[in-house]
Image: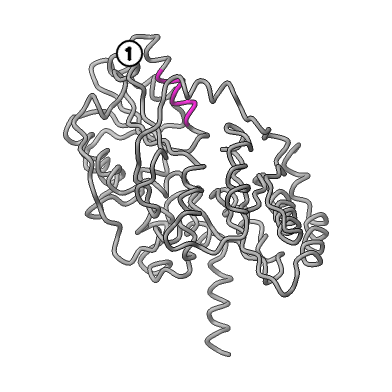
């Protein structure tokens, strides 16, 4: 399969592993943050970490769109569907993320709330057309990748004159999160970044240049396949060895410097920056999320319904916030694999298909257990 099989070849992976081992200086530690949850899963699914020398470490970042949504916004959605009898539509991963009081959208649905899982914004518009007597709200989440389809749906609803469709907008921005990590009061030790794939197809590689220049952190835009990740790690190691800090594009088959300008223009036409937005793990970040422009206020669920800001706490003992900052890893959480499992998630990182804890559980659990057992017997 073109663009997949050739990026999973075993022989090439072995050759890349040898080159990385030869290039990495044995007296230096290389801490590479993969910003995207898709990279985290690729690293574990294909055993990429096992192919790295011991001094090349992957640090998991906040690139999972479901994981970074704070509990209060899920509480808002549950209140919305329970108090206003709306049809609430959203993507599947979000329905299982814990809300306050051990509640979730899935439990609210089991209790009778009309919550529907959709694959696209076009599904939501169809539900709105099919139910003209009901208000239909799209619980929109995600980074720059999922934002243009939301903008399309809003424009389409306006063109059709749909009066019963609105959007609870929670779209967030990658560069703002990257800056928040670099400016954190308690900084995480990071030497370089693997730049996100899908996000970069939309925004391009240009927005990362400021971080490379001002913070001295090399960035390589990486594809999702295992050879993409390994090649990107090698490119970062070369930059670090040579004292360079530039933005390089390994994923050139999909990403350009300027990105998808049509999608950017469409987003800018419909959405604008919020003054600030709360992120799980990163706190309140200025200009890090989007809301509907005044011209589209009729489709803004936060204006159509009473939706007060809710301050909510995560489950006690859950380390998702620290994991999302790269300050801890899933195995540092005492809940992982004990009370927190995919069947009974305590935090968002165990729920999402891009979550770091889900990756450890799905692909690294047996190795971690073996490692722990080995330490006990030493």
Q: Determine if residue 361 is in view.
A: yes
Most foreground residue, 354 or 196: 196
Dot 1: within a 10 Å radius of its alpha carbon, few (fewer than 14), some, or many (20 or more) residues?
Answer: some
Magenta-drawn segment: 147-154
| Figure quadrant of residue 248 | top right
Number of numbered tags placed on the structure image: 1
Residue 353 visible from this viewpoint: no
Near-viewer residue (332 or 1) = 332
Q: Residue 371, percent across and down?
A: 57, 77
Name the residue at the front extreme.
214
Membership of 152 in magenta stretch: yes
Q: Is residue 150 magenta?
A: yes
Q: Which residue is mark 1?
A: 162
Whether residue 254 is situated above or below residue 46 in the rendered picture: above
Image quarter in which the C terminus is found: bottom right
Q: Residue at x 57, y 48 (%)?
A: 38
The outermost residue toward the top is 160
| Element type at mark 1 | loop
Q: Is residue 78 above or below residue 341?
A: above
Displayed quadrant of residue 151: top left
Image coordinates of residue 261 in percent, x first then y, are 59, 24
Quadrant containing the N terminus in the rendered view:
top right
Near-viewer residue (138 or 177): 177
Seen in the image, is 206 located left or right of residue 92?
A: right
Q: Nearer the viewer, residue 349 or 82?
A: 349
Task: Answer above or below: position of 156 versus 14.
Answer: above
């Amino acid at each position: 399969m073109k663009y997949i099989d050739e990026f999973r070849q075993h022989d090439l992976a072995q050759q890349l592993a040898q080159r990385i081992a030869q290039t990495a200086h044995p007296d230096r530690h290389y801490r590479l943050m993969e910003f995207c949850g898709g990279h985290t899963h690729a690293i574990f699914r294909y055993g990429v970490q096992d192919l790295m020398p011991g001094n090349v470490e992957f640090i998991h970042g906040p690139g999972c769109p479901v994981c970074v949504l704070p509990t209060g916004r899920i509480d808002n959605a549950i209140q919305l569907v329970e108090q206003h009898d709306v049809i609430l539509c959203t993507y599947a991963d979000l329905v299982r993320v814990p809300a306050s009081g051990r509640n979730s959208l899935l439990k609210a649905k089991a209790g009778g709330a009309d919550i529907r899982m959709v694959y696209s914004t076009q599904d939501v518009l169809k539900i709105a057309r099919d139910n003209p007597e009901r208000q239909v709200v799209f619980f929109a989440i995600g980074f720059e990748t999922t934002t243009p389809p939301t903008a399309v749906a809003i424009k389409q609803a306006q063109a059709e004159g749909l009066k019963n469709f609105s959007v609870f907008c929670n779209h967030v921005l990658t560069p703002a999160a990257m800056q928040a990590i670099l400016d954190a009061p308690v900084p995480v030790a990071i030497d370089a970044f693997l730049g996100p794939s899908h996000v970069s197809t939309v925004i391009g590689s240009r927005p990362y240049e400021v971080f490379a220049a001002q913070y001295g952190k090399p960035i390589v835009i990486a594809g999702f396949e295992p050879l993409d990740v390994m090649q990107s790690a090698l490119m970062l190691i070369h930059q670090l060895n040579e004292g360079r800090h530039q933005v390089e594009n390994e994923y050139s088959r999909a990403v350009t410097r300027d990105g998808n300008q049509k999608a950017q223009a469409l987003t800018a036409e419909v959405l604008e920056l919020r003054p600030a937005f709360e992120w799980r793990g990163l706190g309140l970040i200025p200009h890090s999320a989007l809301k509907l422009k005044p011209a589209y206020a009729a489709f803004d669920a936060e204006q159509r319904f009473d939706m007060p800001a809710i301050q909510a706490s995560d489950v006690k003992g859950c380390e998702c916030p620290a994991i999302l900052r790269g300050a801890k890893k899933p195995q540092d959480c005492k809940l992982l694999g004990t009370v927190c499992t995919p069947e009974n998630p305590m935090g968002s990182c165990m729920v999402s298909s891009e979550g770091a804890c889900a990756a450890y559980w799905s692909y690294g659990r047996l190795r971690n257990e073996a490692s722990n057992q080995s330490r006990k017997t030493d």
